[in-house]
Structures are given as structure tokens and as C-alpha cells.
């Protein structure tokens, strides 16, 4: 068992039990299976034998199986039809239930939507996180893993990709969906290009390769010829493409929506979700390795945090532009390939939300949940953003082919408020209407429209004039200013990561036309970057910039901006590396300190079993159970490592190649490593670098490599140091 003992709740008063209307609603369809439960068929008849098909037999030999066996046939029929089509994009995902609330009514100057203004409400929410490119995937068996490792690595959480961040708010006014991503811009400006970008990024039609990767000819071919994607490509190639955890991602509604207040004034709005734990990423080498070591890394991480009581939490914020200021920017505020720089349009926090309940069963909750950008509630509306307009058509449409026309009756999708209209029938209809009147108007006025004054949705009366034509606005023609802004705003190590990512991806393109076109396009963004990438991948090496870099920056585009003000190790995974003869007093002390700081600790030893402490070796003291052995888990799955003192233990660690590799690899990934006494000597030898600032004299030393160690190391100083360094903060 792990040492996940702390039950830590964040600030929100959590809804529990039947107080949560969505939870109560789902309860209606929940089946509890206990040891008392007996099997029945789907038509309710008790089943006495579920193991043997009914057949003709003399009791000693098998004869033919009988078609009349309803129990056997039903079992096979149901199994044959278990699968439904996966989502055409965002197929692989994970989700959880939670609670949203606003701080106060500060947003009422922009909207009359109670979900955004009524602080007495706790709104139940569900969030589904996803990767975009890859298939839904399957857990490869150990056998398959040995035989075809490429299949395993294709279905995994840590691929370089955009992450979906789709939220459903179950409000008394109906469901509101914000179907966002972890990146604030998109590849294309107009919905009509969506099938092209998705076909280009998905596995190539000839051979279904690659899975879960943008690193192939067709993707880079398309984006090289479609310069409006330049900005988004920079984000995907940055650290944002390989998040450490769903819990450490920003979310963005991306499209421009509108809010309407009770005065009838309309505002343009963008939605932001800012994680309490800061925005953090893996390093690429880790992401690649975790893909093989733990393909479900992100979904496990989400469940682990919620189940240990460390509820992932975000601030909900808005950016607002008054209608009259729509055209006051050098970009079009309805262009989804552009951000609204925070310096121009401040981000206003208005609420917060947390995820506090894992799902009971994946399929009926995570797989069957379905979102629609067109699902808004009174006080919230759309804009003429051409991407949003197309999305409003697409989502409803795709749910019909994935789940059927009655998809909104599924438990996870149905609203918590009454649903009543004259829509009828269709496959898998669950509603039984007691009224004979399925049209309006009718003689009883049954099922009548509700005026806006009583809560009916009112479209904003927007004046529209123009010629019918296939055009995009003038400001939609500029594609590189914000790609430059993004690149300029990155910290040096973030720039280095982006350069490596592009080099990796373009190296995987074997058509020279593709990588030459893209490196030429890159020169519109940054000359030095374009030159360095082109040199690496055999692209077109520029001798001067295609256009000058404007040199502007916007602070909040860098992940650094979102590091928590007070460093924290809450929810981080710390491995304690031990062998027989370790110092148990230190291990207990560091565990206590880390647990109270809301981190989780995991004992890693030479075997999953009892590891004897130094005291026990001489007949006193305790042993400890290792959670994993050195081969069972790797350093990549942890944020930091701690090695206690103990001469026997340090000697055996040094002799164990895998234990040495643990340290070398964690060091290479710039993780915090704390060690004491002989443990510190082991760390130093394992890294093979002496003189990098280790504190031999008892002082605490933090090296530029991220290793902390000292002769007089204490548990509390370790916690402070590990938190201050921050896993992967540099590299
Ligand atoms: Fe989606 N997108 N999308 N998308 N999208 C889908 O709907 C679509 C776009 C996003 O967890 C599909 O139910 C079009 C932007 C997420 O269930 C589909 C366009 C953003 C999810 C669809 C876009 C997103 C989807 C496939 C361009 C970020 C997963 C399955 C006009 C704001 C939702 C489904 C979940 C899913 C269409 C662009 C985010 C086909 C036509 C921009 C998070 O309807």
C-alpha cells in the first residue's frame, strides 16, 4: 500500500451525497452489485448456470450446442455489440465529477446567467480530458508489449498533442458545455477546414501510421501550406503539448462567446481555467518513456489525486470586451487563431471549481458523455467566430452517429432540470409522455413556449448586414504576429524545448518537400529558430529573416507565469529509494513531512516485500514494505527522489545497476533529489559528477542541476528544497 494517507480538501465546500443534484440523478440508474446479488438475464429471469452452453450430451461426451439456449445466446449477443464508434477526434480521454461556484456576483455586470453570478449555488460539473489525435486505444497485454512495443506506445496518455478540456455544467437552467482545450488557440480559422486538418493529423490513410503523433509528413505538409496554423503549431511544439498532469493544465474555451446582462448589453468573452497547482509539463524524454512504462499515466494520476482527497482545483476566469470595442485591436477578436493578450484584456477571476468524485463506471460516464458547444444557458450566447459557428453544427451531429438521436436522455447527459418538448421517438427513446398532445399550439396549451421573463432563452437581437459570399475578414489574413509573440514570451528553457520538439517532429518527416516548406515558413516567426531547426533537419537554411521579429512579449503565455506564488509539492509523487540497511528514522521523518505537505511517498526497494532497516539488521527496529521494486517502476513516474543514509543500503544501491539508473535518469530530467549521508555519497557516485555543488560541510546546497543534499539534511529542509526546485522546472 502507498502512503497516501492525507485527506486534504481544498477550499470549496464539497457537495456530498444527495445534496448534489446530478449525483442524485445518476443514482436512479446506478446498480449496486453485492455478494447478495444473483445473476439474471436482461429480461429478468434468474440464471442458474452462466458457464456452460446448453447442449446435447450423454453426460460423458459433448454433443452439439443448442441454439435455443437464450442464456448463452444473450451473453454472446450482448458481448458482440459492446463497442460504439469512438469519437472522431479526442477519442482517448478520462473524466471526473466536480463542483463549480462563483466567488460573488461580480460577473453580473456582464451576464444574468445565475451559474456565473449566484454565489449561493454549487453547480455540479463533469470534466472530460482527452488527447486529440490517437485512437481510444487498448491496454496492450504483456505478451503484446513484448512482441510489438509500437502498438503499446501508440495508445498512451503522454504523447505530444493538444489536450481536450471539456466541461459540462448541470445547472437548473439546463446544461451548459464549455468544450475547450489546454491551448488557447486553434489550427484553423474557419470550421470548413476542420476535416482537412483532422485528416492531415490523423494516421495516414495508406498504413494507419502514426498513432498518437503529429510527427509525420501529412501533418507538417498541411500546416506548412496553411499558415494560419503557425501560432497553434508553436503551442503544440512547446511544453504545453506534454503536460505533467491533467491537473496541471490551463483550460481555455478558445472560441469567443458572448455574455448578456440584465440591461440587455452584450459583451464578448473568453473563458479561462487556471490550475491551482500551476502549469507544468513533462520533459520529452520522460514523455516518451512513460508512454511505454505507464500508458495510462494521466488517467491514473487524476484518479489517484481525487481518491487521496487532493482534489484538483482551478480558478475560473473571463476576459471581456465590450461590444463597442470589438474592432479596436490589430487582430480580429473572433479569430480563434489569436489570443487576447492579457496586457490588453485583463483576465478576471470570477469563480473556482474542483474535481471531487471519480466515476463509478467508465463507459456510461466518460465514454457516453457528449458535449455540444451549442449548449448554452440564458445569459450566455455565441459570437460570429466562424469556427464556433461550425462547431455548433458539428457536435450535435456527431453525437447522433456515436450515440443515437436520444443521446441527451443518457444518464450522464441528461439535465438536472425538467426536460419537456414535442420531440418524440427515435431509437432508444426512454421518455413516456402522458399527454396526447405532441405539437404546439394545442387546445390545452400543453408544452408551451416560456417567455424570457420566466426563463425562456432569448437570442440577442444582433444587427447583421452584408453580402452573401465566401470570405474571411481582413484581419484574418495575418498569421505570424502572435506566433512571434508566443515564442518571444517563452523562458529560455521553454524555447530550447520547442526547438527540440520541432527538430524531432520534422526529422520524422521523410519527404524533403515537407520539411523544406515548413522550415521556410518558420522563418516568418523567428530567424534564429528557423535557422537552427533547418540545420538540424535538413531544411532550407535562411540567410535573413523573412519578416522582422516585432520583439513584443506577453507574460502569461509562458508556463512560468503560472507557477504557484508559494512553491508547493502537494500531490507530487516522491520515491524513497532504499535497500536493506537504510535509516528508518529518516525515512519515517521524511514521509511524515511530505505527507503533511500533501505529497505522496512511495518506497522503492530491491523487491516488493519487507526491506530491513539498519536497526533491524542489528536486532532492533523495524522493516518497511516496499511499494515497488527497482524494475517495477521507473524514476520517470515520480517527481522527486529521496535517499536516506545507511552504509549497507548505500553499498547495495551502488551495486545495483537499476538503482544507479534511477538516480542518473532523474538527474537527467532535472528532478529534485534529496539525500543524506551515505545516501548522498551514493547519489554523487551514481551521477558520476563530483564538484557540482554538493554540500560536504553540512550546509544545504541546491545545485543548478536541481540536486539537493547535505551532511545535516533534515526532513523539513528536504520538503522545502524539493518544493523550491520544482520538478522539471528547468532543463
Ligand atoms: Fe472539437 N470536436 N471541433 N474542438 N472537440 C469534437 O465532438 C469540431 C475544436 C474539442 O470530451 C467532436 O463529441 C469542429 C476546438 C474537445 O467528448 C466533433 C471544430 C476545440 C472535444 C468536433 C472543432 C475543440 C472535441 C468529436 C472546428 C477547443 C472532445 C467527438 C470548427 C476549443 C469532447 C465529439 C469530449 C470533440 C468538431 C474544433 C475541442 C467532431 C468541427 C477549437 C475537447 O464534433
Image: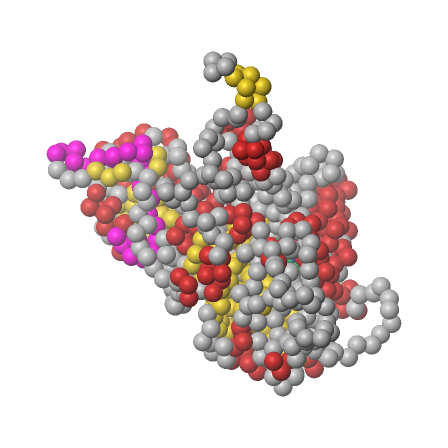
| Residue 444 pos. (x, y %) | 68, 75
Q: Is residue 365 left or right of residue 607?
A: right
Using the rendered image of the protein, determine whether residue 345 is visible from the camera's viewpoint: no
Q: Quadrant of residue 642?
A: top left
Query: Which one is in front, 129 or 264?
Result: 264
Residue appearing at x 80%, y 65% in the figure: 472
Relative vertical location of residue 453 with respect to residue 466 in this rendering, above or below: below
Q: Is residue 588 left or right of residue 29?
A: left
Residue appearing at x 69%, y 36% in the figure: 208
Residue appearing at x 63%, y 44% in the figure: 84
Residue appearing at x 70%, y 66% in the figure: 438
Query: Which one is in front, 178 or 80?
Result: 80
Relative vertical location of residue 225 with respect to residue 437 in this rendering, above or below: above
| Residue 499 pos. (x, y %) | 60, 49
Query: Which one is in front, 554 or 67?
Result: 67
Q: Is residue 448 left or right of residue 275?
A: right
> Is residue 610 in the magenta section?
yes
**Image quadrant of ligand 1?**
bottom right
> Is residue 379 in the magenta section?
no
| Residue 427 pos. (x, y %) | 67, 51
| Residue 442 pos. (x, y %) | 72, 73
Q: Is residue 127 left or right of residue 208?
A: left
**Magenta stretch bounds:** 592-619
Q: Quadrant of residue 159?
A: top right
The N terminus: image quadrant: top left
Residue sitting farthest toward the bottom: 263
Query: Which one is in front, 705 or 621?
Result: 621
Amino acid at each position: 500500500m502507498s502512503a497516501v494517507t492525507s485527506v486534504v480538501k481544498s477550499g470549496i465546500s464539497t457537495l456530498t451525497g444527495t445534496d448534489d443534484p446530478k449525483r442524485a440523478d445518476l443514482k436512479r440508474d446506478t446498480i449496486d452489485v453485492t455478494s447478495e446479488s444473483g445473476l439474471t438475464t436482461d429480461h429478468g429471469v434468474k440464471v442458474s448456470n452462466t458457464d456452460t452452453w446448453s447442449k446435447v450430451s450423454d453426460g460423458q461426451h459433448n454433443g452439439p450446442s443448442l441454439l435455443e439456449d437464450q442464456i448463452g445466446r444473450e451473453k454472446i449477443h450482448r458481448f458482440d455489440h459492446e463497442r460504439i464508434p469512438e469519437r472522431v477526434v479526442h477519442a482517448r480521454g478520462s473524466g471526473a465529477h466536480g463542483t463549480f461556484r462563483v466567488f460573488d456576483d461580480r460577473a453580473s455586470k456582464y451576464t444574468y446567467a445565475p451559474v456565473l453570478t449566484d454565489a449561493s449555488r454549487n453547480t455540479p460539473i463533469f470534466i472530460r480530458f482527452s488527447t486529440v489525435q490517437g485512437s481510444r486505444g487498448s491496454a496492450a497485454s504483456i505478451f503484446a508489449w513484448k512482441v510489438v512495443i509500437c502498438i503499446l506506445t501508440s495508445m498512451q496518455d503522454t504523447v505530444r498533442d493538444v489536450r481536450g478540456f471539456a466541461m459540462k455544467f448541470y445547472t437548473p437552467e439546463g446544461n451548459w458545455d464549455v468544450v475547450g482545450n489546454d491551448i488557447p488557440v486553434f489550427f484553423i480559422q474557419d470550421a470548413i477546414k476542420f476535416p482537412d486538418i483532422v485528416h492531415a493529423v490523423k494516421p495516414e490513410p495508406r498504413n494507419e501510421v502514426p498513432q498518437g503523433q503529429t510527427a509525420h509528413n501529412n501533418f507538417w505538409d498541411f500546416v506548412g501550406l496553411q499558415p494560419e496554423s503557425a501560432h497553434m503549431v508553436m503551442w503544440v511544439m512547446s511544453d504545453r503539448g506534454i503536460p505533467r498532469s491533467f491537473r496541471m493544465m490551463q483550460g481555455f474555451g478558445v472560441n469567443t462567446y458572448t455574455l448578456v446582462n440584465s440591461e440587455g448589453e452584450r459583451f464578448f468573452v473568453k473563458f479561462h481555467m487556471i490550475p491551482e497547482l500551476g502549469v507544468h509539463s513533462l520533459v520529452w524524454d520522460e514523455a516518451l518513456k512513460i508512454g511505454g512504462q505507464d500508458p495510462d499515466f494521466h488517467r491514473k494520476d487524476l484518479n489517484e489525486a481525487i481518491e487521496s482527497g487532493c482534489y484538483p482545483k482551478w480558478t475560473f476566469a473571463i476576459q471581456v470586451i465590450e461590444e463597442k470595442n470589438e474592432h479596436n485591436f490589430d487582430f480580429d477578436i473572433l479569430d480563434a487563431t489569436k489570443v487576447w493578450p492579457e496586457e490588453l484584456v485583463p483576465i478576471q477571476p470570477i469563480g473556482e471549481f474542483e474535481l471531487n468524485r471519480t466515476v463509478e463506471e467508465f463507459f456510461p460516464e466518460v465514454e457516453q458523455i457528449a458535449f455540444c458547444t451549442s449548449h448554452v444557458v440564458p445569459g450566455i450566447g455565441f459570437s460570429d467566430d466562424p469556427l464556433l459557428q461550425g462547431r455548433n453544427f458539428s457536435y450535435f451531429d456527431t453525437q447522433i452517429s456515436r450515440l443515437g438521436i436520444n443521446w441527451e436522455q443518457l444518464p450522464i447527459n441528461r439535465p438536472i432540470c425538467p426536460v419537456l418538448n414535442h420531440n418524440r421517438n427515435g431509437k432508444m427513446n426512454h421518455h413516456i409522455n402522458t399527454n396526447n398532445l405532441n405539437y404546439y399550439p394545442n387546445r390545452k396549451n400543453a408544452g408551451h413556449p416560456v417567455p424570457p421573463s420566466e426563463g425562456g432563452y432569448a437570442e440577442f437581437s444582433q444587427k447583421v448586414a452584408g453580402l452573401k459570399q465566401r470570405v474571411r475578414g481582413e484581419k484574418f489574413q495575418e498569421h505570424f504576429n502572435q506566433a512571434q509573440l508566443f515564442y518571444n514570451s517563452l523562458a529560455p528553457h521553454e524555447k530550447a524545448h520547442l526547438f527540440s520538439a520541432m527538430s524531432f517532429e520534422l526529422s520524422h518527416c521523410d519527404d524533403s518537400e515537407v520539411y523544406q516548406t515548413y522550415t521556410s515558413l518558420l522563418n516568418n516567426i523567428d530567424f534564429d529558430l528557423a535557422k537552427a531547426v533547418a540545420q538540424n533537419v535538413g531544411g532550407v537554411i535562411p540567410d535573413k529573416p523573412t519578416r522582422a521579429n516585432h520583439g513584443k512579449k506577453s507574460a502569461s503565455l509562458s508556463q512560468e507565469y503560472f507557477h504557484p506564488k508559494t512553491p508547493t509539492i502537494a500531490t507530487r509523487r516522491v520515491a524513497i529509494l532504499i535497500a536493506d540497511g537504510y535509516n528508518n528514522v529518516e525515512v519515517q521523518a521524511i514521509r511524515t513531512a511530505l505527507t503533511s505537505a500533501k505529497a505522496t511517498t512511495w518506497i522503492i526497494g530491491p523487491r516488493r516485500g519487507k526491506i530491513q532497516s539498519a536497526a533491524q539488521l542489528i536486532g532492533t527496529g523495524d522493516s518497511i514494505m516496499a511499494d515497488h521494486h527497482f524494475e517495477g517502476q521507473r524514476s520517470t513516474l515520480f517527481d522527486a527522489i529521496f535517499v536516506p543514509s545507511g552504509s549497507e543500503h548505500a553499498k547495495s544501491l551502488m551495486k545495483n545497476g537499476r538503482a544507479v539508473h534511477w538516480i542518473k535518469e532523474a538527474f537527467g530530467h532535472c528532478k529534485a533529489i534529496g539525500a543524506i549521508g551515505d545516501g548522498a555519497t551514493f547519489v554523487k557516485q551514481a551521477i558520476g559528477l563530483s564538484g557540482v555543488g554538493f554540500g560536504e560541510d553540512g550546509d544545504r546546497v541546491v545545485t543548478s542541476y536541481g540536486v539537493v543534499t547535505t551532511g545535516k539534511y533534515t526532513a523539513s529542509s528536504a520538503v522545502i528544497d524539493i518544493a523550491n526546485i520544482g520538478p522539471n522546472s528547468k532543463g
